[in-house]
Amino acid sequence: MRVVLAEDLFLLRDGLVRLLEAHGFEIAAAVESGPELGRALAELDPDVAVVDVRLPPTHTDEGLQCALEARRRRPGLPVLVLSQHVEQLYARELLADGSGAVGYLLKDRVFDAGQFVDAVRRVAAGGTAMDPQVIQQLLARGPGDERPLARLTPREREVLEEMAQGRSNAAIAGKLVVTERAVAKHTANIFAKLGLEVSEDDNRRVLAVLAHLDQGR
């Protein structure tokens, strides 16, 4: 599996290269700036891109914008974004096209090798890998919120958070210590309350939920 990696800090970039190679990935390119990333994504056609949001020369959202432009040229290009902090705007932009194969992780997660590698593989396979803190902020609501999300029960919100992290019904059942049948019932209720059509494609279903919630903010 070929990876384009973009990270401007040399030590972190080198560490990620070594980690990914140790787990069987081929590093097609490891770059440190937005222009280099744009060229690499256009020329190398990777299986997945792992991209720091903030890259030179602007140090704003250069990495994210390069990745989004690459996804416009190649719809569905798998992109895993790394960020120092939760930025809901970045998550919204990443999820906007609803085509799947996206991830948003805080850099702290990189230090858990198993979790990071699993996220890369999940995104490359067309799934989602959303940082729990990103999910919590996307699902947060204030007092008096009348959006459809406010109608979810506490258990339904728990199930939705797990769904958003790409977990199957079986995995959610194990995590919450309930039956798969109970999870299926909660899932059906969630979609009914949010007005979303149930799909057999879990990854697209999760993206639809996240996009719907975020658009309502």
Image: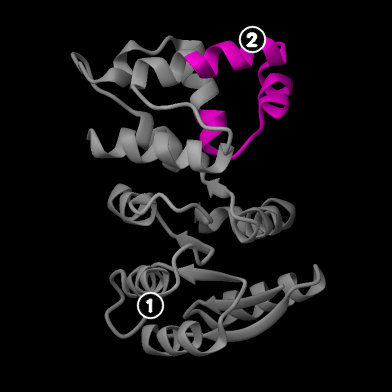
Of helix, strand and loop, which one carries label 1?
loop
C-alpha distance separating marks 1 and 2: 44 Å
Question: What secondary structure predominates along the stretch shown in magenta?
Answer: helix
Q: Residues within 10 Å of mark 2 (few under 14, many from 20)?
A: few
Q: Residue at x 41, y 34 (%)?
A: 209
Q: Above or below — where is 31 with respect to 76? A: below
Q: Give the mark nearest the N terminus, 1 or 2.
A: 1
Q: Is residue 1 above or below residue 196?
A: below
Image quadrant in which the C terminus is located: top left
Q: Which residue is tagged 2?
A: 182
- Mark 1: which amino acid? Leu
As shown in the figure, which amino acid type bears the numbered disc 2? Ala
Q: Position of residue 205 (x, y in %)?
A: 49, 36
Q: Secondary structure at mark 2?
A: helix
Q: Quadrant of the N terminus?
A: bottom right
Magenta highlight range: 161-188
Q: Residue at x 28, y 24 (%)?
A: 141
Residue 103 position within the rendered picture, expressed as x and y whole percent measured from the top left: 51, 54
Neighbour tally class for label 1: few under 14, some 14-19, many 20 plus, Cα within 10 Å: many
Count of marks overlaid on the render: 2
Position in image of residue 62 (x %, y %): 32, 75
Q: Viewer-nearest of labels 1 and 2? A: 2
Q: Residue at x 50, y 87 (%)?
A: 40
Residue placed under numbered mark 1 in the picture? 55
**158 left or right of 124 in image:** left
Q: Considering depth in this image, is 94 or 45 the residue closer to the camera?
A: 45
- Which residue sits at x=64%, y=9%? 182
In which image quadrant can residue 10 be found?
bottom right
Residue 176 on the magenta segment:
yes
Q: Is residue 157 above or below residue 10?
A: above
Q: Is residue 74 magenta?
A: no
